Amino acid sequence: MAALQLLVNGVALGAAYALVALGFVLVLNATSAVNFAQGDLVMAGGLLAVALAPLIPLPGIVLLPAVLVLMAGLGLLLALAAYLPLRRRPPVSVFISTIAVGIVLQNGAAILFGPEPRAAPPLIVDDTLHVGGLALPVQSLAIIAVAALLIGAQQWVFARTQLGRRLRATAQDPEMARACGVPVTAMILLTFAIGAACAGAAGLLLANRYFVTPTSGGDLILKAYIAVTIGGWGSVPGAVVGALLIALFEVGVSSVLSYPVALGVLYLTLLAILVLRPQGLFGEAVRRRG
């Protein structure tokens, strides 16, 4: 029974990590730029849920739509401030600008909320589900269900709609997409909005069980980076699988040894992957992007 609970908790953590990594890789594909503010957007989403809780004293599932919309707006502001003015500059310019945005978010959160850990409302009633003698954490099951729904809806939009085809065309070859009449700048702005909404959803999902502080984004961006590296740069399924593997690894090793040991082994594993299989599990063919 304990092993099953660990598995469910690990998958729930991995589902939240997957949302972080998904937003990270979507922006990477669309712009060839690394958004190092993604982890701080997760933190912002968590604190946004904390701020909304007194105004709307309802479970987190009710707050989720508001968090998604507000975080999408923050993603648009991020793109307008940190990417579009620098899109013709060397990639390191965007790299530095997103780090600067992350620092602004951290300091703004510290001023508004203080340094102490905060907890968002539970997604639904925090209880235990008993099925055939098994006790399953309802909160973890809800996190898995909500994350799967958000990831599935996003993939449906990308695979089945005209908007999704335009977004994929922008990510694959922006110059050709522009020549075919695709509004590339609008698609890039939308990608940043989707990425920030994913981060905000992850923040809400994580902030009840794992708390949130103004500096918690740094650890999350590392997890997203590792997930994308394990799965393969540019691969959306790889990012999701990488995030699940990281969370299951963390929960499994932490239950036997300790969390610091789990992190140390995780980083050593990352180094081994970079040496032995740098393209990751689902690595795409190397190509130049326009």
Image (cartoon, grey):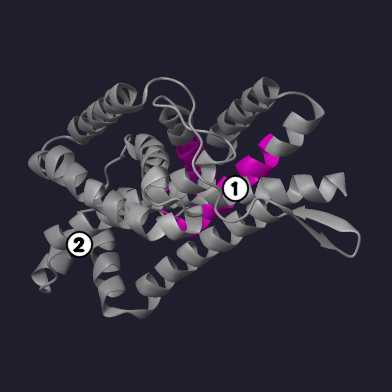
* Depth check, front residue: 140 or 54: 54
Magenta part, dominant SS: helix
Q: Quadrant of the C terminus?
A: bottom left
Residue 103 appears in view: yes
Per the rendering, the mark at residue 118 is: none
User: Can you identify the residue that label 1 sits on?
Assistant: 14
User: Can you identify the residue that label 2 sits on?
Assistant: 187
Q: Which residues are magenta?
A: 223-250
* Depth check, front residue: 42 or 85: 42
Q: Is residue 231 above or below residue 99?
A: below
- Tell me the amino acid under the disc marked 1: Gly
Other-residue count near label 1 (Cα within 10 Å), few / some / many at <14 / 14–19 / ≥20: many
Assess whether residue 230 is covered by the magenta stretch: yes
Residue 282 appears in view: no
The residue positioned 49% from the left and 26% from the top of the image is 117
User: On the rendered structure, is 104 left or right of 139?
Assistant: left
Which element carries disc 2, helix, strand or loop?
helix
Image coordinates of residue 58 in percent, x first then y, are 48, 54
Which element carries disc 1, helix, strand or loop?
helix
Q: Residue furthest right?
A: 133
Image coordinates of residue 37 in percent, x first then y, are 32, 35
Q: Earlier in the sequence, mark 1 or mark 2?
A: 1
Measured Cα–Cα span from mark 1 to mark 2: 28 Å
